[in-house]
Image (cartoon, rainbow, N blue to C red):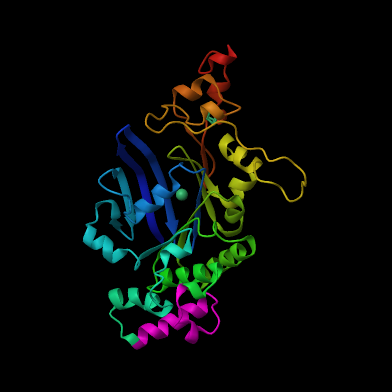
């Protein structure tokens, strides 16, 4: 599979009156054609900021990419001009958000909104654009596309609107689709349909998808690989099966414990106690120290070395380093 995106040592900061927020602190990941990477974590962990930075949609001048590379098909988007970014957005990389209503213009027909991007970027005739719009509506499962093209957003249900948003995002045949909480506003049945739609679309178009979510049910259904973010860092990453069945980081373990299990009715939800650290002055050591049931002396002093149980799986945690379990060496608590 061809690699289409490689993010290296990405740092994103926001300057505020209170000081500089280090929202993303050295994130690395890559993505291949036809693959879905889910970036998961609690709100404020940096997952949306990371996604927005790929589209260069970090509000400036307060927010900036302070360091790192975003290599998309060979070009570093972190250094791309605004002019070139406008050509890339919606054409090579598309994004969809949580609320389908805000993404649609209530005063324009669906047909107009579908064909707009194509006409603007792809130099096609009105007729060709309409033909393509019909195909897209069909692909996303909207019945009677010919009539529907002439209708306005308010004439569609929430689930249908999200299908239309997806059709608009895909009409220029992007290589990468970024979906930020795409099903959060929808009820469970529609949510399942939209996730199935992503799968169908991926089979048909081979588009790579970055799925930003805090919902592990969505991840279980749609992801190939998972990156777990905490306090601006990816603290664990692996295939879906590695992360779900062999979570290594105590934070990931806590997240998985907090989902209600269908086979354990009545089992209490176990939220992780405490709050993430302040990103004005992030901790030098493991950012999870204050909430971690296994925290050791070394954890708050030094950022953990990477533990790699397989070629595709890693977690940044001291638990797996033999030295911390040797009395008097790195772990004072065991003295
Ligand atoms: Fe817990 Fe220490 Fe591992 Fe951090 S490094 S997750 S504090 S055991
Ligand atoms: Mg978000």
Quarter of the figure with residue 249? top right
On screen, 184 above or below 19? below
Which quadrant: the N terminus? Answer: bottom left
| Residue 95 picture location, percent across and down | 41, 61
Quarter of the figure with residue 322? top right
Residue shown at 24% from the left, 52% from the top: 79
Q: Is residue 75 magenta?
A: no
Q: Quadrant of ligand 1?
A: top right
Residue stretch in magenta: 127-153
On screen, 89 above or below 216? below
Query: Is residue 1 something one can see in this rendering?
Result: no
Count of numbered badges drawn on the protein: 0
| Residue 26 picture location, percent across and down | 38, 40
Q: Is residue 48 left or right of residue 264?
A: left
| Residue 278 picture location, percent across and down | 43, 31
Which quadrant: the C terminus? Answer: top right
Q: Residue furthest bottom?
A: 127
Most common SS among magenta residues: helix
Between 159 and 81, which is closer to the camera in this rendering?
159
């Amino acid at each position: 599979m061809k690699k289409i995106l490689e993010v290296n040592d990405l740092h994103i900061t926001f300057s505020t009156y209170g000081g500089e927020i280090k929202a993303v602190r050295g994130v690395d990941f890559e993505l291949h054609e036809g693959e879905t990477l889910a970036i998961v974590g609690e709100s404020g962990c940096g997952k949306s900021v990371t996604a927005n930075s790929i589209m260069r949609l970090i509000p400036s001048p307060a927010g900036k990419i302070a360091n790192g590379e975003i290599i998309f098909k060979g070009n570093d988007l972190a250094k791309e001009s605004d002019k070139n970014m406008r050509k890339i957005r919606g054409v090579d990389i598309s994004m969809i958000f949580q609320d389908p209503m805000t993404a649609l213009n209530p005063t324009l027909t669906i047909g107009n909104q579908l064909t707009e991007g194509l006409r603007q970027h792809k130099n096609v005739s009105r007729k060709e654009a309409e033909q393509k719009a019909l195909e897209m509506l069909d692909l996303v499962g909207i019945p009677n596309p010919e009539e529907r093209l002439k209708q306005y957003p308010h004439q569609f249900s929430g689930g249908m609107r999200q299908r239309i948003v997806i059709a608009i995002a895909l009409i220029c045949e992007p290589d990468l689709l970024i979906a930020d909480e795409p099903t959060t506003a929808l009820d469970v049945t529609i949510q399942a349909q939209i996730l199935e739609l992503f799968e169908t679309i991926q089979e048909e178009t081979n588009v790579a998808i970055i799925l930003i979510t805090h919902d592990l049910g969505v991840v279980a259904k749609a992801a190939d690989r998972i990156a777990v973010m905490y306090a601006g860092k990816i603290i664990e990453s692996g295939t879906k099966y590695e992360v779900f069945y062999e979570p290594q980081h105590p934070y990931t373990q806590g997240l998985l414990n907090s989902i209600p299990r269908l086979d354990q009715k009545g089992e209490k939800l176990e939220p992780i106690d405490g709050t993430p650290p302040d990103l004005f002055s992030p901790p030098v050591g493991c950012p999870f120290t204050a909430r971690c049931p296994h925290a050791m002396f070394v954890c708050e002093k030094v950022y953990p070395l990477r533990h790699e149980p397989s070629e595709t799986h890693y977690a940044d945690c001291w638990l797996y380093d033999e030295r911390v379990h040797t009395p008097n060496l790195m772990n004072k608590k065991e003295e």
